Structures are given as C-alpha cells and as structure tokens.
Image (cartoon, rainbow, N blue to C red):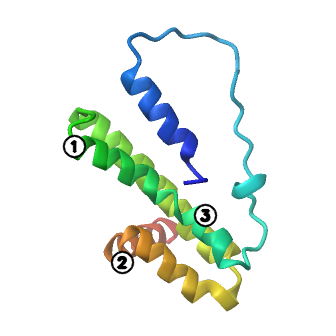
Amino acid sequence: GVWGEDYLMSFFITYFAESYTGILDELYIYSIDTGISSTDRITDLKKWEKFCSVASVFSTISLAQSENIVTLTEEQSIAINKKCDSMIATLIIYLNKFVDDSIKNAAHEILCDYCGNEYISQLTAALQRKDS
C-alpha cells in the first residue's frame, strides 16, 4: 500500500521490539493534503486504486495473526479494527468529495473489491447516521 504503509511498518517494528524508549522530540510530522493524501480532484482510477490499497495494510496484519506470526490481545485487535474503520471511512469520504463523477461508479467498485461490499455498505451507513 502507498497510503498507510507507515502504519504497517510501525505496527511490526513496535510488535517485535524488545524494548521501548520514549522521547519528547518531534521526529515525525504527518502532512495531510500532500502527495498521495492530497485532496485534489481524483480523475484517474490508478490514483484511486493507490488510495484503496490501504486495505492491504490491515489484510497483512490479519494474515500475520492468522499464521501465528503475531499474537494480539483483544484490546489490540479492537484498536486495529477501529483504525481500519477510520481509514476506510476516510476513503468513503474521499470517494464522495474528491472522486470525479465520471469515474465515481468504477471507483466505488474498486473500493468494494478491496474491502467487500458489505463492509463498505456498513461504513457508509454509519457515516450517514453520523452526518444526520
């Protein structure tokens, strides 16, 4: 994935780290609305598919768990599921706000191919309830 790859990298680095040390310095500042996260009109399905590839981040973590590469507590699994919901909900918002109408139906299909129709329908309904 090109969107969320830092989340995947951070997950595995912190999971397998033998110890942690905290510091107060800011070493990483995330810049929204630049590069792939730019909110310019999306008129190209290839660019849209790069956004949708974020689903592979969570598929990779799920696969690692199912193959016993990582063992997560219930609390960790819930946190990862919430992060997944948040990132995919952002994609739904991007689809509605920034994807050009001429490719919107195809973009929706791509999103459903990555995440599943039912999951996208559930998140879309939750976003609509939140907006009302």
Residue 117, labelled with which disc?
A: 2
Q: Which residue is mark 3?
A: 50
Identify whether 91 is placed above or below 70. below
Identify whether 3 is placed above or below 94. above
Q: CA distance from mark 1 to mark 2?
A: 25 Å
Q: Secondary structure at mark 1?
A: loop
How many other residues sit within 10 Å of disc 3, few (<14), some (14-19) or many (≥20)?
few
Please give the name of the residue rendered at 65% of the width and 87% of the height, measured from the top-left corner.
103
Please give the name of the residue rendered at 54% of the width and 10% of the height, measured from the top-left corner.
22
Q: Amino acid at mark 2?
A: Asn
Q: CA distance from mark 3 to mark 2?
A: 19 Å
Please give the name of the residue rendered at 35% of the width and 45% of the height, measured from the top-left corner.
61
Q: Secondary structure at mark 2?
A: helix
Residue 67, labelled with which disc?
A: 1
| Closer to the camera in the image, 115 or 119 | 115
Q: Point out the tag, 3 or 2, that comes first from the N-terminus.
A: 3
Q: Amino acid at mark 1?
A: Glu
The quadrant holding residue 121 is bottom left
